[in-house]
Amino acid sequence: MTILIIILSLVVLAALVLGGLAATGRPLPTMAPGGGLLRRRFGPEYERAVARHQGDTRAAHKELASRLRLHRRFRARSLPAERHDAYRASWARAQEQFVDSPAGAIAEVDQLLNRLIRELGYPSDGYGEQLAAVSVHHPHQVDGYRRVHTLASREDLARAMAERTEELRSSLLAARELFDALLAGKPAADESADTEAGGTPAEATGTTQSRGGDV
């Protein structure tokens, strides 16, 4: 009898909670299997996906499972040592630019990450596909790219952010984490010959760049 009373109490409590959510107009949460695996794989990206779907875990799981299915077998290209050096020099210039032009530095870092991601062989079908692919392999750092790209896409960035340099600085540091993670692979000495013979490895394989010139 005691167990029955407890069960009935829990049922009533759950009904009251769901009724309260419905009364406020908030979407009722949905659950889906496999959440534990996705949460461990994507870390902070899992929480962002759930928030983006307003707590609908089923929709979030569907999105993340699709990312995993499409991109989990991807293996980044190994860049030759001189390309590593060129990218790090470009980052240093962008970081120095931050002192005089925070908005300009953010725009430069956004383009720099775009070029690096493409040269490593990630999808080149636009920012959204890039972000999805990178999130599978660097879920703890990918938000840095999201943050600088969102800022750089603002037409009024220089004016709107004139008094918010700390936000720009924080985004730049977050982007640096992804930049370092992407360059963490061992340089490929055997690709140096391709670079000397006819341009960068990206050019040799037909990879295109969407914004800006070379690093």
Image (cartoon, helix red, strand yellow):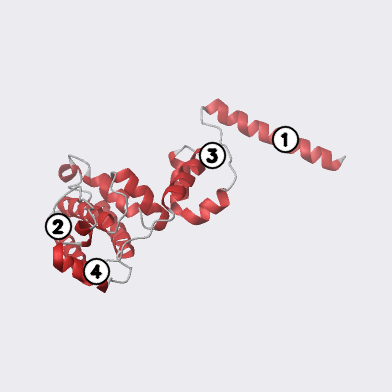
Quarter of the N terminus within the rendering: top right
SS for dot 1? helix
Q: Which residue is mark 3?
A: 58
Instruction: Determine whether label 4 and label 1 are within 8 Å by CB.
Output: no
- Label 4 amino acid? Glu
Q: Residue at x 18, y 62 (%)?
A: 200
Instruction: Determine whether label 2 and label 3 are within 8 Å by CB.
Output: no
Q: Is residue 16 left or right of residue 83?
A: right
Q: Position of residue 184 (x, y in %)?
A: 32, 68
SS for dot 2? loop
- Label 2 amino acid? Asp
SS for dot 3? helix
Q: Position of residue 108 (x, y in %)?
A: 18, 54
Q: CA distance from mark 2 to mark 3?
A: 42 Å
Q: Which comes sooner in the sequence, label 4 or label 1?
A: 1
Q: Nearer the viewer, mark 2 or mark 3?
A: 2
- Label 3 amino acid? Arg
Q: Residue at x 43, y 56 (%)?
A: 73
Q: Which residue is mark 4?
A: 191
Q: Residues within 10 Å of mark 2 (few under 14, many from 20)?
A: few
Q: Residue at x 57, y 37 (%)?
A: 30
Q: Which residue is mark 1?
A: 11
Q: Which residue is mark 2?
A: 214
Q: Position of residue 46 (x, y in %)?
A: 47, 49
Q: Nearer the viewer, residue 114 or 27?
A: 114
Q: Which comes sooner in the sequence, label 2 or label 3?
A: 3
Q: Is residue 133 left or right of residue 152?
A: right
Q: Residue furthest right?
A: 1
- Label 1 amino acid? Val
Q: Which comes sooner in the sequence, label 3 or label 1?
A: 1
